[in-house]
Image (cartoon, helix red, strand yellow):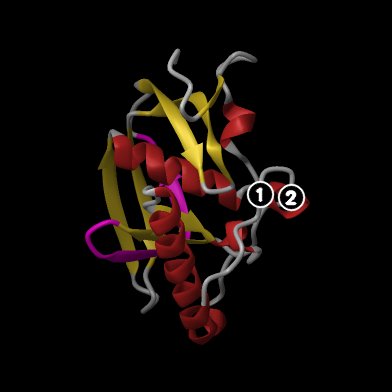
Amino acid sequence: MKREILLLGSPSLYEASSAVTREELPELAEAVRDLHDTLLDFRAAYGAGRAIAAPQIGLQKRLIYMFINKPTVFVNPVLSFSDDEMMEVMDDCMSFPNLLVKVKRHRRCAMHYRDLDWRERELRLEGDLAELLQHEYDHLDGILATMRAMDDKSFYLKGCKEH
């Protein structure tokens, strides 16, 4: 079921999420369907959206749903970085759909997580996918891109021609 996406300023977006326990796995099916439906609805409305974190729909669990070519569910993800190479990106977010924020992100990362069968997995990422999953991972810790802005002039409304 499509859920409402919490918007910038919603207090629960700034809360850290709790880990999913193995016992909660059967309950995740509904949450994953809701994340899927909400992501596709946002994509239809805005022409963007590749991943969504559970806190964005009010579920304070360490759960990320990504749908690019196929669905990928990250349960209790942990990020690691192999080096310190950074990149500047214009970050956007479903929780502030008309705002871009200039931030620095790691160029490469690895996501260690469990899948829906509780198997341990690892995904190595680079470039835009590394940026995407760092952004979603931040949501699990109550961190928004606005909090990572490079400076106080790093905010742009979409459609502004000067950035």
Q: Which mark is residue 86?
A: none
Q: Is residue 142 above or below residue 38?
A: above
Task: State which region is magenta.
Answer: 68-81
With 99 as the anchor, is 127 left or right in this view? Answer: left
Magenta span has 72?
Answer: yes
Residue 53 among those drawn in magenta = no
Circle on res. 10? 2
Residue 134's quadrant in the figure?
top left
Classify 10 Å Cα crowding around label 2: few (below 14), some (14-19), many (20 and above): few
Q: Which residue is mark 1?
A: 7
For label 2, the SS is loop
Measured from the top left, where is residue 86 in percent x and y? 38, 22
In the rendered image, the quadrant that contains the C terminus is top left
Give whichever of 139, 42 is nearer the camera: 42
Residue 72, percent across and down?
33, 64
Instruction: Tell me the residue at 54%/37% (across/down).
Output: 98
The answer to whether 141 appears left or right of 109 in the picture is right
Which residue lies at the image location 52% right of the left edge and 48% below the top edge?
94
Residues marked 2 and 1 touching at CB (< 8 Å): yes
Toward the bottom, the furthest residue is 26
Give the dominant element type of the magenta stretch: helix, strand or loop.
strand
Q: Which amino acid type is shown beneath numbered disc 1? A: Leu
Report the amino acid beneath label 2.
Answer: Ser
